Image (cartoon, helix red, strand yellow):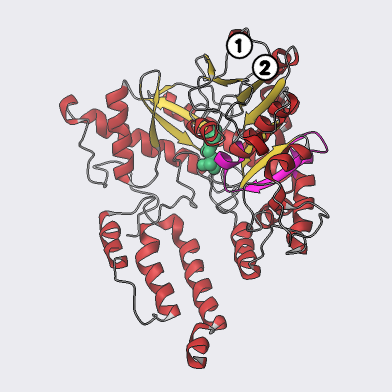
Amino acid sequence: MDDENARLDRADQVLRTAAAIALDYAGSVDDRRVTPDQDALAALAAFHEPLPDIGADAEDTLRLLHAVGSPATVASTGRHYFGFVTGATYPVALGTSWLASAWDQNAALPVMSPVAATLHDVVRGWLVDLLRLPAGTAVAFVTGATVANAACLASARDALLGRLGWDAQADGLFGAPPFDVVIGERAHSTLSKSLGMVGLGRSRVTVVPADDQGRLRADLLPDIDGPVLVCAQAGEVNTGAFDPFDPIADWLAERSGWLHVDGAFGLWALADPLRSDLVSGLDRADSWATDGHKMLNVTYDCGIAFVRQPDDLRRTFAATAGYLPPGSGFEAMHHTPQSSQRARQAELWSVLRTLGRDGVRRLVAGSCEAATTIAGRLADGGLTVLNEVVLNQVLVRLVDGPTTAALIAEVQADGRIWCGATSWDGATAMRISVSSWKTDLADAGFAADVILECARRVGDRPAHARAQQPSRGAPTGGPPRSRPPRR
Ligand SMILES: *Cc1c(COP(=O)(O)O)cnc(C)c1O
């Protein structure tokens, strides 16, 4: 047994190996295809081994993970990934996550981790200041915006029912007095998931039509009495558009209710004073959800729930047990859906400290500038830009839906950059999201070059062959690749 423990306890050697492997990965991520090639995908079969009866060597295990796993990752930490809205990671965030994993703190209670509790308080203050939210706003760290939305909506539910004399925590929702839920037509799919999770229903909502950018039409808000829960959005996932918060808040002020804002990536626009027209009235909400792992480029997973009145989080998430000490300071387990939880505030603290207020502003402004550059180049090249580029999202179409689908397939097969498809106005569109801190204007130009080159290749093929037939990677007669794929 002592031998066995000694074998598992070679911490120094194991961690050095892990660090060397991680450095190798981080240092080469920009030199490879953005998505795994067929060989890398086929090699994943090596993981399908039976659970060993006798444990394997730790370093050998790490080496297998790197040899087989690393080539099958998506290079979303690189400069050329434009898919979904997927942030990369700052080196200081990655390094902090190494240290925070070494600490392995349970951030549930201050008594379990004084450092986590202190960093929570510091980061709360910094975020509320940076995003210009009401000073006393409570902050809860969760896995992502989906759970941040759910945490806010659960708090809203209990607060609104409380005003109606109903204790939802004690008595549940069966028999509870009803209230209305209002969402925009272009609310994110996971907002509906969150509404379902907290028992408010995905379909039992009033849907307000959106305009051509996906903004909720405040002039079409329904003629209903309060109390009402309104879910607005900062950053539509295709266009990046912002709902008109002031008119929504004015409408709500005539009723009683709760305004929640899903700002998974868009909330960070609050850090850029030049974007104040987009965010006007955003601070009038009762709760806000955002991600750290998208625009701010911290490691997964990191969602942030902001609730104006800290007691509203506590009412919903407090747990009691005989062994729990009486409260002092912010107790994360009594303000989040989790009990045990990792200290997500550590990576946030590091990134905010090393960027500073001006760095976050430049990050937001830089993403928008790169997106604007891509949009301009694509428009010049004959694509139709479907959105006003107000933040980091570009939505384009080549000719029509099917031709756009062929272009997307061509770009994905090419492998130098990656962006995905969405449906807009009933037809396929290509969505380009600038969400990596690394993506500069040269990378934006590179992305536009690749897309235009792929568009030419699609255009050169007969129409009937466009839909399924991306050419096999290498451009034919086009300019040479500036970053040749390694594998
Ligand atoms: C990404 C996103 C979400 C979900 O965020 P997760 O971090 O994936 O849970 C919710 N709303 C919007 C607008 C998003 O862009």
Q: Residue 302 versus residue 130: which sits nearer the camera?
A: 302
Q: Considering the numbered disc 2 on the image, is that residue within a helix, a strand or a loop? A: helix
Q: Amino acid at mark 2?
A: Ile
Quarter of the image where the C terminus is located: bottom left
Q: Residue 180 versus residue 209: which sits nearer the camera?
A: 180
Q: Which residue is mark 2?
A: 248
Kindly indicate the quadrant of the structure image that contains residue 263: top right
Residue 274 is a magenta residue: no
Choose the circle earlier in sequence order: 1 or 2.
1
Q: Which residues are magenta?
A: 127-149
Residue at left offset 49%, top offset 27%: 202
Kindly indicate the quadrant of the structure image that contains residue 408: top left
- Residue 124 is marked as none
Dot 1 and dot 2 residues touching (CB under 8 Å): yes
Q: Is residue 398 left or right of residue 202?
A: left
Rendered view: 353 above or below 401:
below
Is residue 444 visible in the rendered image? The answer is yes
Q: Where in the figure is residue 365, as x and y percent of width and height?
A: 64, 36
Q: Considering the numbered disc 1 on the image, is that residue within a helix, a strand or a loop? A: loop
- Residue 221 is marked as 1
Q: Residue 122 versus residue 438: which sits nearer the camera?
A: 122
Q: Where in the figure is residue 63, as x and y percent of width and height?
A: 40, 74
Q: Where in the figure is residue 238, as x and y percent of width and height?
A: 48, 28
Q: In this figure, what is the number of numbered marks?
A: 2
Q: Is residue 91 left or right of residue 123?
A: left
Q: Crowding at label 2, few (<14), some or many (≥20) Cα neighbours within 10 Å?
A: many
Is residue 268 visible in the rendered image? The answer is no
Q: CA distance from mark 1 to mark 2?
A: 8 Å
Q: Residue 262 versus residue 193: which sits nearer the camera?
A: 193
Q: Is residue 49 left or right of residue 200?
A: left
Q: Amino acid at mark 1?
A: Leu
